[in-house]
Amino acid sequence: MSNTSPPGKPPQDPPTFEDIPIAERETVVETVQKPRSLTWLWWLGGLSAIALLSIGGWFAYQAAQTRPPEVSSSPSPIASTSPSPSSDGRLLNHFPYEEAPQSELEAITADGGIRMRIPAARAFKEMSEAASAAGIALNPLSGFRSVKEQEQVYFDVKAEREQTPQERALVSAPPGHSEHHTGYAIDIGDGNVPATNLSPDFDQTAAFKWLQNNAARYNFEMSFPKGNKQGVTYEPWHWRFVGDKNSLETFYRAKEFKPASP
């Protein structure tokens, strides 16, 4: 259909919506359909997502409840700690020692009151004779002690002096833990200065200085020097024989230890 006007008439504009008759306009309006709302789909999707999240959270909770506990690969504080002070057998810083058999003891004094194991006794006699030749009097004060004798030395003196077990152990080992049980240990004094017997002042005597310079030649050594790791009070008078296999094992196996905890 052409929009050109007949010859001689001015051209006419094409008809607008307002030029359409009312009846026809209403028919056209009625046939125009509005698009459907999709809001319900958004609501449905949201509810579905919430449901899925809830179900997933429930399964995750159940899995966490049934999962075995994780084991840490790092050592626990208890496992890394060094061993307890009593694990090496020490009691109040003193090691346990077996009592020497009576058949293995020999007297080192004329009255037979002080005895040592046979190798130690003979070594001490030889050392004492060498010292005497140099004008030194090595006076034996105590040698072998039984466990029963050590009970008196420890408990009776402890009660007499009103000492605690720890205080008494600083100067005397508990029964079963004295080097004197072995028959290899001896307390030595200076026969010319008896006032220093069993005293730290013994280290000021000629006898002590001679022992420092010569005792090793006879296989004797001081058991508890100053600052000893065993934690026993300095005892310059206390010496022990380490001149055979048994004596060496007795003391040096015991010496391989860590310092006691404070």
Image (cartoon, helix red, strand yellow):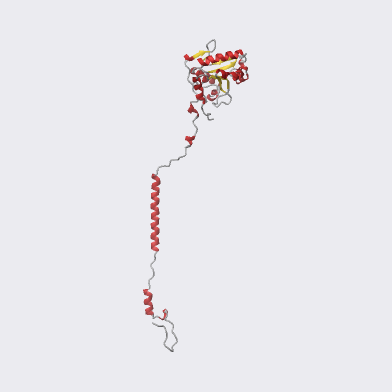
Q: Please report the residue visible at 40 percent of the width from the left and 48 percent of the height from the top.
A: 61
Q: Is residue 17 above or below residue 182?
A: below
* Residue 141 coordinates in the image, percent (x, y): 56, 15
Q: Is residue 210 above or below residue 70?
A: above
Left or right: 187 in relation to 56 = right
Left or right: 31 in relation to 217 = left
Picture quadrant where residue 212 is located: top right
* Residue 235 coordinates in the image, percent (x, y): 57, 21
For the residue pair 1 and 68, the one nearer the viewer reads as 1
For the residue pair 170 and 158, the one nearer the viewer reads as 170
- From this viewpoint, is residue 160 visible? no
* Residue 120 coordinates in the image, percent (x, y): 52, 16
- In this view, which residue lies farthest toward the front? 217
* Residue 167 coordinates in the image, percent (x, y): 55, 24
Picture quadrant where residue 135 is located: top right
Q: Is residue 168 above or below residue 128?
A: below
Q: Quadrant of the N terminus?
A: bottom left
Q: Quadrant of the C terminus?
A: top right
For the residue pair 122 and 140, the one nearer the viewer reads as 122
For the residue pair 164 and 202, the one nearer the viewer reads as 202
Q: Please report the residue visible at 37 percent of the width from the left and 76 percent of the height from the top.
A: 28
- From this viewpoint, is residue 54 visible? yes
